[in-house]
Amino acid sequence: MTTLDDRTTSPAGPTVADVSDPSRLAEPHEAISAEELQLAARNHGIPLEALRYDVTPAGLHYLLIHYDIPEVDPATHALTIGGAVDRPLTVSLADLRLRPRVTRQVTLECAGNGRALLHPRPVSQPWLVEAVGNAEWTGTPLAPLLREAGLGPDAVDIVFTGADHGVERGVEQDYQRALPVADALREEVLLAYEMNGAPLLPQHGAPLRLIVPGWYGMAHVKWLRSIEVRTEPFEGYQNAVAYRVRQDADDPGVPVTRIEPRALVRPPGFPDFMSRRRVLRPGPCTVDGRAWSGHAPVVGVEVTTDGGESWASAELDPADSGDFAWRRWRYEWTAAPGRYVLGARATDASGRTQPVEQPWNRGGFANNLVQRVEVVVPAE
């Protein structure tokens, strides 16, 4: 691990940029670094057994915090809406609570989910497949507020700024993300102040966050403090540098936006402590899990018990929770003694299906490779 003393600094002394390492790929056979473990300890995924819940309890929902959890007082917090608008607005949390109230179930997934399974491994938050959760988000729609502020015909991007502040790849910044105007004006987009019927927890963006159904988690800006309308494309770090699918460092890439289809298996049986390999008794077993997509509703799930050599259709529960919430699926399997590799793949109404072999990209983004769950069925 590089230390601050190892870095080259100017004669005047170190700068803010000196605290960051450039992005890199792990060397072949390189173990997870102490810095990656530090991120993994700070952030967390959903325990896969919690896929049994239709609505993920807040403490089990995946969590990624780029910088620090800021200290924000709900009593004095206000949201400003400005930039290229006719009528700049300042709205308190109390004012937002007086506006029309909407609750939506929305599945959130980190754009880097599955990154640690890629080869070579992009060195960053080392997600396996657990960076997901499905919650009930309550708030008020964003679009009416933007219209009240008066969007001009030349508006291009809407920039959302959070109260969290840090350094990333040498760039000091507030966390900022932009949405194209058309996406920001979708009726599903919320300014949320509650999660699962309770005020937002600090780590989930209290007192106010953005919810953009169908998009990966980087778009759902937490600790939201300002909205700015711009007449030119936003070139901030999180849009123009991070969260782009690229093949090498010089590739400008394409932006990460909507969630690719994915199905996860709720691991059956019980686990080995270290490997998490499963032990399952012989006999009938209902294999189940969840499936979702940000492009279109999930219309099918297939299950494999032999590592992808063969596939069988699973049964999907009704989509009672809306187009942006995950769906439960189930598959009846009779487990005979032996060793198995279980997996599931989702297909959505746009025709997108999970790959068995994952195309690689330098950031490890939008990786929806089929999960592998090793199961041992012992002879009785």
Image (tube, rainbow, N blue to C red):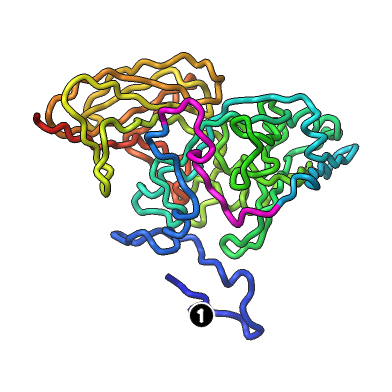
Q: Position of residue 22 (x, y in %)?
A: 51, 64
Residue drawn at x 54%, y 19% is 321
Q: Position of residue 222 (x, y in %)?
A: 65, 44
Q: Is residue 25 magenta?
A: no
Element marked by disc 1: helix
Quadrant of residue 9 within the rendered picture: bottom right
Q: Position of residue 36 (x, y in %)?
A: 43, 58
Residue at label 1?
5
Q: Is residue 68 magenta?
A: yes
The magenta stretch spans which residues? 51-71
Relative depth, front residue between 312 and 51: 51
**Overall secondary structure of the magenta stretch?**
loop
Q: Is residue 258 rendered to the left or right of residue 354?
A: right
Please identify the quadrant where the N terminus is shown: bottom left
Looking at the image, is 99 positioned above or below residue 85? Answer: above
Relative depth, front residue between 262 and 62: 62
Quadrant of residue 221 within the rendered picture: top right
In the picture as drawn, the residue positioned furthest to the bottom comes out as 11
Q: Position of residue 4 (x, y in %)?
A: 52, 76
Q: Is residue 182 rendered to the left or right of residue 276?
A: right
Relative depth, front residue between 182 and 52: 52
* Number of other residues with Cα within 10 Å of mark 1, as a class: few under 14, some 14 to 19, many 20 or more: few
Residue drawn at x 61%, y 34% is 195
Looking at the image, is 81 positioned above or below residue 283? Answer: below
Quadrant of residue 167 within the rendered picture: bottom right
Please identify the quadrant where the C terminus is shown: top left
- Which amino acid does the dot numbered 1 rest on? Asp
Relative depth, front residue between 254 and 340: 340
Q: Is residue 56 rendered to the left or right of residue 167?
A: left
Residue drawn at x 76%, y 43% is 227
Does the image show residue 230?
Answer: no
